Amino acid sequence: MKNLDRRQFLGTIAKPAAVASVVMANPTLMAKALSKIKSATGNPKDIARDETYWREIQQGYTADRGIVNLNNGGVSPSPAIVQEAMKRHLDFSNTSPAYSMWQILEPQREPVRRRMARFFNCDPEEIALTRNASEGLQICQNGFDLKAGDEVLTTTQDYGRMISTFKQRECRDGIVMKQFKIPIPAENDREIVRLFEDNITPKTKLILMCHMINITGQILPVKKVVNMAREYDIPVIVDGAHTFAHFDFDVNDLDCDYYASSLHKWLCAPHGTGMLYVRKEKIADLWPLQAPGECGKDDIRKFEEIGTHPAANYLAIGDALTFHQGIGSKNKEERLFYLRDRWAKRLIKHNRIKLHTSLKPGKGCAIATVQIKGIDTVDVSKHLWKKYRIFVVAIKHPEFEGCRVTPHVYTTIEEIDRFSDAMEAILKHGV
Ligand SMILES: Cc1ncc(COP(=O)(O)O)c(C=O)c1O
């Protein structure tokens, strides 16, 4: 994804002032925002270790430092400037909603769409702004005509709600969902592609795959699977809930036709925001969830026909993008590797520690799942919370168990070390 140079970045910061003339620009806020997200130049690996730089970013959030929040995979906090933008837009919406929200603010969704497309390296006419990843994915999962007996293919590690969506189609339309296991961790791309291919039958009509698996942080070789599936003429829906603005990639790295993500995870946009990418020539044939008034429309906005909705959330996506671009995708990715490696490489030295996430380049990023052999994962997570106020997620899956640990850019080194200390104390003394 494109990183802005300092001049371009300052341009993006300055421009909203024009927009904000309608929504009461606050110069103090703008100045504060600038100081928090000053552009970093240099080698991303060096920037990742520059605590002076990250201290500024950490201070851009209103995180509760009374706890150590290592569950940013579920949902993330927004930086203060994003919260402020959202509140500002909401306040203005309420001055005269039918005018201020619908006529003034709603049209500003278009520049947000354009910026999102520029960042993802696609046409603005291929980006729909949604309420979350679930909405974007369900548009795709429910948007294909399937008949009784048709098969859809996915893995046993895909996201629960997306599995439920296909289960509902099984009940409703008589389709058949096929799921298969993939290795944990999965470090061999050829094996993953082969597993997808081996599970294709003449009845397979659709594939759903994760770009990043939420319970392990595993990155899957989307482009290779998409290219293989194209040979069978099978569309692939890419669940990118965890990947947009997490690490450095754009749509060309996936070469997919359908991709949906949450924006309230890694972009730190307001809660209740997501995006859906549909390749231009595929839009007309994909049914939207709510009827736009005309069948077979090829306007991406047909997926946004959800009735009355707030404008504030969507407009503040732009502020989150500005914050993200101020850091830079590559710098953020390297920092997240650095935070993950700091705890993971320390803990794997102990023989009772099992990591369910590959630390190899390209196979994961901030998320990793760790198990202490001999102690129940739920007990570990409860103990971390009760004794240390450290928040991780206990994952109990039929194929493995472990605590999912997810720092974010606002996480401090000291917080990471407190987590490692606590895990070592558990190894020594139990729970
Ligand atoms: C892999 C995956 N897909 C989809 C979703 C749904 O995302 P949202 O809650 O933004 O709809 C999640 C949420 O954690 C997820 O991890």
Image (cartoon, rainbow, N blue to C red):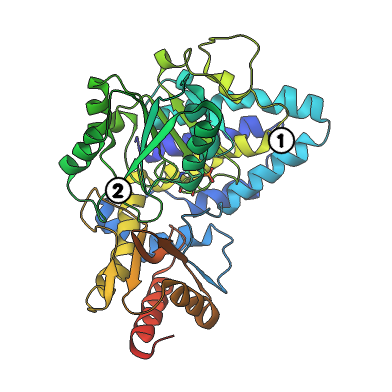
Q: Residue at x 27, y 70 (%)?
A: 354
How many residues crowd mark 1 within 10 Å: few (<14), some (14–19), many (20+)?
many
In this orientation, does residue 321 appear? yes
Q: Nearer the viewer, residue 293 or 197?
A: 197
Tell me the kind of residue under disc 1.
Val
The residue at which mark 1 appears reads as 23
Q: Nearer the viewer, residue 63 or 346?
A: 346
The residue at which mark 2 appears reads as 181
How many residues crowd mark 2 within 10 Å: few (<14), some (14–19), many (20+)?
few
3D distance between C-alphas at marks 2 and 1 = 51 Å
Callout 2 secondary element: loop
- Quadrant including the C terminus: bottom left
Q: Residue at x 81, y 25 (%)?
A: 98
What percent of the width, then of the height, locates residue 169?
51, 31
Q: Nearer the viewer, residue 256 or 16?
A: 256
Tell me the kind of residue under disc 2.
Lys
